Amino acid sequence: MKILLSLIAAALLLVTSGSARAGQTFDAVKKRGAVVCGVHTGLGGFGAPDQKGNWAGLDVDVCRAVAAAMFGDSEKVKYVPLSAQQRLTALQSGEIDMLSRNTTWTLTREAANGLLFTATNFFDGQGFLVAKKLGVKAATELNGATVCVQTGTTTELNLSDFARANKLDIKPVTIENFEEAASAFVAGRCDAMTSDKSQLAAIRANQTPNPDDYVILPELISKEPLSTAVRQGDDQWFNLVKWSFYAMVEAEERGVTSANVDAMTKSPDPNIQRLLGASGDMGKGLGVDNKWAYVIIKQVGNYGESFERNVGKASKLKLERGLNALWNKGGLMYAMPIR
Amino acid sequence: MAAPLPLSGGLLSRPLAWSRRHLFNSPTNAVMTVVVLWLLWATIPPVVDWALLKAVWVGDPAACRAAGGACWAFVGQKYRLILFGIYPYEEQWRPLLAIVLFIVLMLVSAHPASWRRWLFWLWLSGLALVALLMWGGVAGLPFVANDRWGGLPLTLVLSTSGIVLSFPLAVLLALGRRSRLPAVRAASIAYIELWRGVPLVSVLFMASIMFPLFLPEGVTIDKLLRAQLGIILFTAAYVAEAVRGGLQAIPRGQAEAAEALGLGYWQKTRLIILPQALRLVIPPLVGQFITTFKDTSLVIIIGLYDLLSSTKVALSDPQWRGFYVEGYIAAAGIYFLFTFSMSRYSQYLERRLNRGRI
């Protein structure tokens, strides 16, 4: 009994006081000296520990950008891997400060779950992957086709909505695990595979014997704006997370990269001067140092660099920019003016 | 002169006679034999072909895809991630040492000669040493926060702490359930039935998702600790029932004799009843340990990197996509190694314990 009591006492000692729930997340993060960031348990290119246990990915870079803006050091992040079921509660309960984990921005999540989405760092949508020899050119030609789909996801619901709306007789082959669904498709168990387009591109590039024998159909049957979220109730924190990401997009638009950022501080362009803290008080307005965006770009890179490194041409996923190109290059990435 | 050849005829006819007697002694058996032989023929060669002949042992993903066999190169490339999760790479000798320590502890406690009181203290100090190794922060070891623990050490920590720390609670519950005091008995029954009535998944879910919402603002309890407490409280209910089985097997005369000697309740229980009862329940305890060991893989739903989840992380690498069969076989192999030796050990124990009582 004594042992049990001392164990309970030891357990209570381990109770740590975490971030404050109401209001001052910003101050709590500052006091703690690290951003607690909720990430995926393992999704290559977006958020996954590498061979040596270091976190990398497009979502992870948002965490690093916020830490860079806050502390001048992108390494001051504590990563909390979360399952799909846990992620919203973890943010609501204050276990994490921000959620950057392939999460779709929806009305319910803001209206009912007490979250606020800051900005979308990846625009995705559900599509179809088919073998070229099938001769299908559009998703509406999939009448009578068998389609491999992961169970228990919105993907499955979107597929049946799409079939009903277009009066198509689609036979879903539901498989519980995403990797197994992909392998089943590659092995020829279904005519088509449906999932988020970025995932389909990854399957096509890495899992098919010859990627040129497969094609992703042009239609998107759903919108998946994958975004970063914070808890409601601390506007200063909300602002910092939002603008940390916008700084990365703005940097790409202005041609500022991690390589040339030092030279760019002497740029005569007032937009770049404001971004890099050479003039104006942009950082002070957010409650951080005026060099905040300079540090983000120096340590994490601009959005384009982050994209190419994690999911683009330089990575194994080899995704096209597509919707994630800058607004003036045909995409949707549009940073609000930093001024 | 040609010698008769009964010998060769005998050699030839003996397997034939044997198979006629055992495999083809009735039409049904003959059909079954043929079907089973065909099944073996249809399954074994492709598996051997895939797992051994066409397998790639060293190489890159392209070589694996070209070969079409098992890609053991994936396991070779990722074994440290599978075994140790996201524990800092340079410090991974520490979890390795922790695994060795666990195995030594298990081997020591396996021998009946060490079933003494010191074993309990050995386990407590062993677990403390493991904690010291894993956390560090003293004696020049860099501190590693427990959110970076993972792989096999995490599985072992969760399961062994689950068994060892639930044990005292379980003994109290088992005694409580047989108590003459109605309140104690009712509380014990309620606890045991409540925890046995819910699945472990829901316990973990409550611990990791619902529980933080009930806490006062600004207070969070470590995720690993929440899961560990959940496993301990859950296991205690099962171990309590095993212990109660042991208590019931002790003849009434033992307690009466102890009372006749003037021993009080606690003296009687501690000196006479429990030492006999606990020896009896070691086989079911080993069984419970196997269950707990495998059940810890459920922590995957709360984002802890135990052996199975770290295997999944290894599989999420886009470069090595699609080799999940190899990854899962490797993880299953490690689980099997542990559970099979425990199960063999349990059989050995039963034989040994029964031998003394005939």
Image (cartoon, coloured by chain):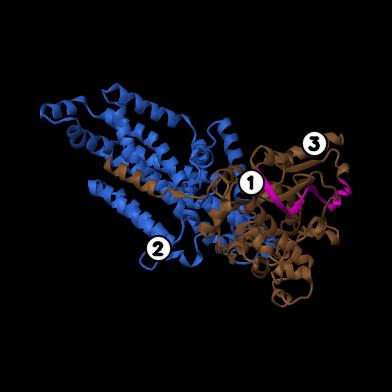
Q: CA distance from mark 1 to mark 2?
A: 57 Å
What's the magenta region?
Answer: A115-138
Q: Which residue is mark 3?
A: A161
Front one among B90 and A183: B90
Q: Position of residue B247 (x, y in %)?
A: 27, 30
Does residue B317 appear anywhere in the picture? Answer: no
Q: At label 1, which amino acid type do we have?
A: Ala
Asked if the magenta segment contains residue A45, the reply would be no
What mark, if any, has residue A101 been given in the picture?
none
> Taking A293 as reference, is A20 above or below it?
above
Q: Which is in the foreground here, disc 3 or disc 1?
A: 3
Q: Which residue is mark 2?
A: B137
What shade has chain A been given?
brown
Q: Secondary structure at mark 3?
A: helix
Q: Are marks 1 and 2 on the same chain?
A: yes
Q: Which residue is mark 1?
A: B42
Does residue B193 appear anywhere in the picture? Answer: yes
Q: Earlier in the sequence, mark 1 or mark 2?
A: 1
Q: Secondary structure at mark 1?
A: helix
